[in-house]
Image (tube, rainbow, N blue to C red):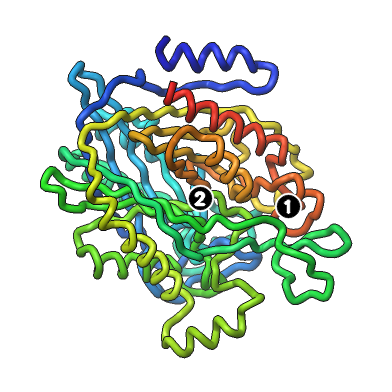
Amino acid sequence: MDAKKIIHEKSRQILFLTFIVILSQDLIAGEGQLYVGWAGADITPGRPVALVGQLHKRISEAVQDPLTATVLALETRAKDGSREQAIMISCDILFVRAQTQKKLQDAIALKLSDFDPSKLFINALHSHTSPGFIDNEYFGLYDTSNDKGVMKPSEYENFFLERLTEAVVSAWEGRKPGGYSWGLGHAVLGHNRRTAKTDGSAKMYGVGDPDFLHYESIDDEMVQMLFFFDINKKLTGMVVNSVATAQVTDDTNFISADFYSEARENFRKKFGEDVFVLFQIGAAGDITPANHEYIYSRATKAMLERKGISARQELADRMLQAVDDVFPYSKTSISESTVFSHMVAKIDLPCMGPSSQPFYLVDSVTPAEFHVIRLGDIAIATNPFELFSDYGLLMKSRSKAILTFIVQLSCHHSGYLPTERAVRGGGYSADKYFVGPEGGYKLVDETVRLINALWE
């Protein structure tokens, strides 16, 4: 039975729980030659903008470092003529708007006749020092209509789409035969930011409070990697997946990619100026960058002063070390022919209703779009949430893939997705949400079901 029939039959069996619509999927065929294309784009606005991500209006006063988009185009071509494809885009933005991704897909449909635009998706690195995309976003909190010389969010969206369209076309048209390998390393890049209290409540941070009991959940300190090579086994680029959001210095009045700017510079110096790095954020809705760890905060600050580096550089150095430690072993196992399958699906998730939505405007898109990819032994699964870490660990533990890359804040933005215990404790990130724990467990079930179907 082919994959479409498997998905259709299983979807019918659990119709009383959820409704899955498979939008685009090729048959799970045999191995095919891998083709790889890369491109980058500078998405830094040329004028001041309103910076989103805080509860007050900030107009950018300067550019500390550029905002970047990185595009990875993948295709396999089997001997029987069948093909599979995907275009992944990572951006230094707070989150992805559904309307923005759809506009990009529509633009690509006009440019590339041999690519299925539904198999393109964007993920955000959650930079709090980047522009928004919708005028009067956050119910007017960032209204710039009376700010002379300030770029409107809708103007930035047009600029963003123009730059990404060029990069996507370049990556797709520049794809060449190549190979890939995977790697797994370790780095302390983030930790749980929610604390449980002695009275059963919870809050964000609060380690120094007299009623602090413990952190609410555990951390995921693994760094997952995909390395891509040309036919001469020269490295062309990599995917680096971790729980480190771009929030080391997030309440400022300058445009910045946060510590990912230092990370890119590290990778360029180590691997070469022409090597691309596409970053992904795993399940990190309740995770904060490691420099925000308060138990060791005074000692950490003192150690940074001794080293003479910033907290951003420290995280960038840790990430590079995690990759550098495993790269020599990963490049000994390069596959040029591989099984590749890409499913684009939608899932109906139970929503909590307008009264429970955050004060900010989420993309209340239901059913929610998500992508599931198999690349050899590796799985990639997206979601549109700031997904609490427990859900990501559940998906990974139940997946048949040797490594499962969870990619949050992808395709659109549906706010935090807290766990059951987080909702019981309350506090920021667990008091207002669009989809709650019931939807979270359903998302886990359906994501795992579709991943594992690719191994049947």
Q: Quadrant of residue 251?
A: bottom right
Residue at which label 2 appears: 282
Q: Is residue 17 above or below residue 377?
A: above
- Work out which residue is located at the far right of the displayed protein and give it: 199
Q: Is residue 377 above or below residue 449?
A: below
Mark 2 lies on a secondary structure that is loop
As drawn, is 396 to the left or to the right of 90? right
Q: Residue at the spot x=21%, y=26% of the render?
A: 77
Rendering coords of residue 170 (x, y %): 21, 45
As drawn, is 257 to the left or to the right of 416? left
The N terminus sits in image quarter: top left
Q: Earlier in the sequence, mark 2 or mark 1?
A: 2
The C terminus sits in image quarter: top left
- Alpha carbon separation for disc pair 2 and 1: 18 Å
Residue at which label 1 appears: 430
Q: Amino acid at mark 2?
A: Gly
In this rendering, which labeled residue sits more in front, label 2 or label 1? 2
Mark 1 lies on a secondary structure that is loop
Q: Residues within 10 Å of mark 2 (few under 14, many from 20)?
A: many
Q: Residue at the spot x=44%, y=15% of the render?
A: 4
Rendering coords of residue 25 (x, y %): 39, 22
As drawn, is 417 to the left or to the right of 94? right
Tell me how many marks there are: 2
